[in-house]
Image (spheres, rainbow, N blue to C red):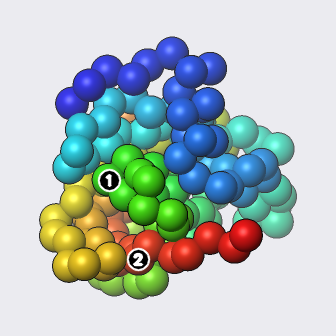
Amino acid sequence: MSDASGSNDSLARIQAAIPHRPPMLLLDEIVEQSEQAIHCRKQFRADEFFVQGHYPGQPIVPGVILCECAAQASAVLLSALVEGQGGVPVLTRIQDARFKRIVRPGDTIDIQATLNDRLANAFYLTAKVTVEGKLAARVDLSCALAETEG
């Protein structure tokens, strides 16, 4: 894997790879990336919109947000594989999502996504989300290449 640290450059690379923008851009940086795998990072803030009511007084990051982080990391990985093909990677399936530990505002997660298989424009990946090296979530994802408008 190549080292891709340098958060400003890293954020620019993320924004060039996927169409997500705040508040739904959930990746802070690319730590490492190869053809088959990517390692991204995200630090959750107390003012994130999705923790405001989840749960008042004891905020936790929703599991669906952890899945979205995994999907965005996967899309960044896939965008490099399909560069020049005129499409954007989109999530088509979440399977076997497992949540092992609570993630709270202030926590920094590491997202590692690995490409397992590709059949035409269908991609199959596994992503792991960790906090301080401990597994917080694991999910199998399927993505497809969707045509862009315009």
**Quadrant location of residue 68?**
bottom right
User: How dense is the environment of label 1, judged by Cα within 10 Å: few (below 14), some, or many (20 and up)?
Assistant: few
Asked whether, in this view, residue 42 is left or right of residue 54, the answer is: left
Q: Position of residue 105 (x, y in %)?
A: 66, 43
Please state which of residues 99 and 144 is positioned toward the viewer in this rendering.
Answer: 144
Asked whether, in this view, residue 39 is left or right of residue 103, the answer is: left
Element carrying mark 1: helix
Q: Which residue occupies 65% across, 55% down?
A: 19
Q: Quadrant of the N terminus?
A: top left
Asked whether, in this view, residue 8 is left or right of residue 35, the answer is: right
Please state which of residues 52 and 56 is positioned toward the viewer in this rendering.
Answer: 52
Distance (Cα) linking label 1 and label 2: 12 Å
Asked whether, in this view, residue 73 is left or right of residue 21, the answer is: left
Q: Position of residue 81 (x, y in %)?
A: 32, 53
Residue pointed to by mark 2: 144
Residue pointed to by mark 1: 81
Please state which of residues 113 and 148 is positioned toward the viewer in this rendering.
Answer: 148
Q: Position of residue 66 (x, y in %)?
A: 51, 60
Return the residue found at the far left.
117
Look at label 2 and name its amino acid: Ala
Look at label 1 and name its amino acid: Leu
Identify the mark nearer the N-term, 1 or 2: 1
Return the residue found at the far top.
6
Element carrying mark 2: strand
**Quadrant location of residue 96?**
bottom left
Label disc, if present, on residue 110 of the rendered structure: none
Image label count: 2
Asked whether residue 150 is in view, the answer is: yes
Q: Which residue occupies 26% across, 25% down?
A: 2
Q: Position of residue 95 (x, y in %)?
A: 34, 83
Q: Quadrant of the C terminus?
A: bottom right
Q: Which residue occupies 63% across, 42% down?
A: 15
